[in-house]
Image: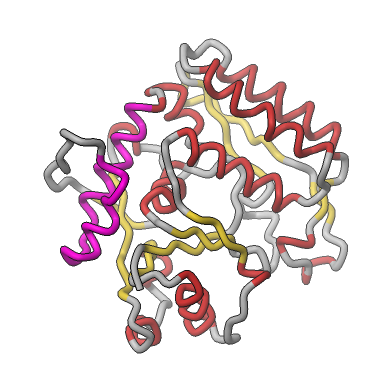
């Protein structure tokens, strides 16, 4: 067993804290067979301009739930894919075209926007939006979907079984999850539970509220990737797990920064 695993619902252009956890993982299991929630970020995200962080606006993909509140995330359908494609493209361009880093995002968005013409699944779009950000930042992990894996029904048991399916030796968990997670269920299967924390100041000030696109458009790919690598380096993990987490993430010549103030999510 080796590597680190993160399990998270597909989010539309995820917040910086969410993106950081996925970036730190070698495996991301897309939790797509749990109940869809309109109050969550599965089909929407807050955008804010690079030069005006106080001005915020929701970008939402109108979504139909075929089975009502019982609809699982992977069952949710985009109401009007073509209109949603146009809306996503227009809003992203409106907010970030003035950034000197817009060109690289614009190129990456082209195949993503084309997905609206081939799928009507909200989960497919949200997963793809996260994947393009991870790939821009140099992530080379593997993505799996919980709907395609077998697991027990208990909350902790289910997450542990999913983690086992990746072959990972560590499970990255935000402190919100740590409040209910039964760590002994994981350790019984040989998986360490690792609380994942992110800074709360500077670039991370609104990291739990707005899309990571703003940070990317403000700092650029290289600076943001370095910031995420530093966050990975500062997690409280044992040395063997730390080495695994840093493998292929720290370019030659870079060293982890010292500790800083972190907050879980």
Query: x, y (%) of residue 171?
Result: 38, 68
Q: Observer-nearest residue: 58 or 98?
A: 98
Task: Name the colouring of the figure.
Answer: secondary structure
Q: Residue at x 50, y 55 (%)?
A: 142
Instruction: State whether the magenta stretch is mostly helix, strand or loop.
Output: helix
Count the marks: how many?
0
Judge from the rendering whether residue 229 lies leftward or rightward of residue 92; answer left or right.
Answer: left
Judge from the rendering whether residue 60 lies leftward or rightward of residue 101; answer left or right.
Answer: right
From this view, report whether residue 155 is shown above or below residue 122: below
Q: Residue at x 25, y 41 (%)?
A: 250
Query: x, y (%) of residue 214?
Result: 48, 28
Q: Observer-nearest residue: 149 or 172?
A: 149
From this view, report whether residue 65 is shown above or below residue 85: below
Q: Residue at x 83, y 59 (%)?
A: 65
The C terminus lies in quadrant:
bottom left
Query: x, y (%) of residue 44?
Result: 65, 43
Q: Residue at x 67, y 24 (%)?
A: 91
Q: Residue furthest left?
A: 258
Query: x, y (%) of residue 8?
Result: 53, 60
The N terminus lies in quadrant:
bottom left
Instruction: Inspect the magenta stretch and tell me whether residue 248 lies in it.
Output: yes
- The span shown in magenta is 222-250
Instruction: Inspect the magenta stretch and tell me whether residue 227 lies in it.
Output: yes
Judge from the rendering whether residue 83 lies leftward or rightward of residue 113; answer left or right.
Answer: right
From this view, report whether residue 44 is shown above or below residue 136: below
Query: Would you identify the image quadrant in which residue 187 lies?
Result: bottom left
């Amino acid at each position: 067993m080796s590597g680190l695993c993160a399990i998270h619902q597909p989010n539309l252009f995820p917040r910086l804290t969410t993106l950081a956890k996925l970036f730190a993982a070698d495996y991301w299991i897309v939790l797509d067979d749990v109940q869809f929630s309109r109050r969550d970020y599965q089909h929407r995200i807050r955008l804010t301009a690079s030069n005006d962080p106080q001005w915020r606006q929701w970008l939402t993909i109108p979504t139909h739930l075929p089975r009502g509140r019982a609809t699982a995330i992977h069952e949710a359908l985009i109401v009007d894919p073509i209109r949603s494609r146009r809306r996503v493209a227009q809003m992203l361009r409106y907010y970030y075209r003035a950034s000197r880093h817009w060109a690289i995002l614009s190129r990456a968005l082209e195949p993503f926007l084309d997905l609206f013409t081939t799928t009507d699944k909200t989960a497919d779009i949200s997963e793809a939006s996260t994947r393009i950000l991870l790939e821009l930042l140099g992530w080379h992990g593997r993505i799996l979907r919980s709907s395609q894996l077998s697991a027990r029904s208990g909350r902790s048991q289910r997450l542990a079984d999913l983690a086992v399916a990746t072959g990972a030796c560590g499970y990255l968990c935000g402190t919100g999850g740590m409040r209910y997670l039964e760590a002994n269920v994981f350790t019984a299967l040989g998986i360490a539970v690792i609380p994942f924390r992110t800074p709360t100041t500077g670039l991370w000030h609104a990291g739990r509220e707005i899309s990571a696109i703003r940070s990317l458009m403000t700092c650029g790919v290289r600076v943001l990737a370095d910031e995420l690598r530093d966050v990975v380096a500062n997690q409280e993990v044992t040395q063997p797990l730390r080495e695994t987490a840093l493998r292929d993430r720290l370019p030659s010549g870079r060293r982890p920064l010292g500790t800083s103030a972190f907050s879980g999510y």
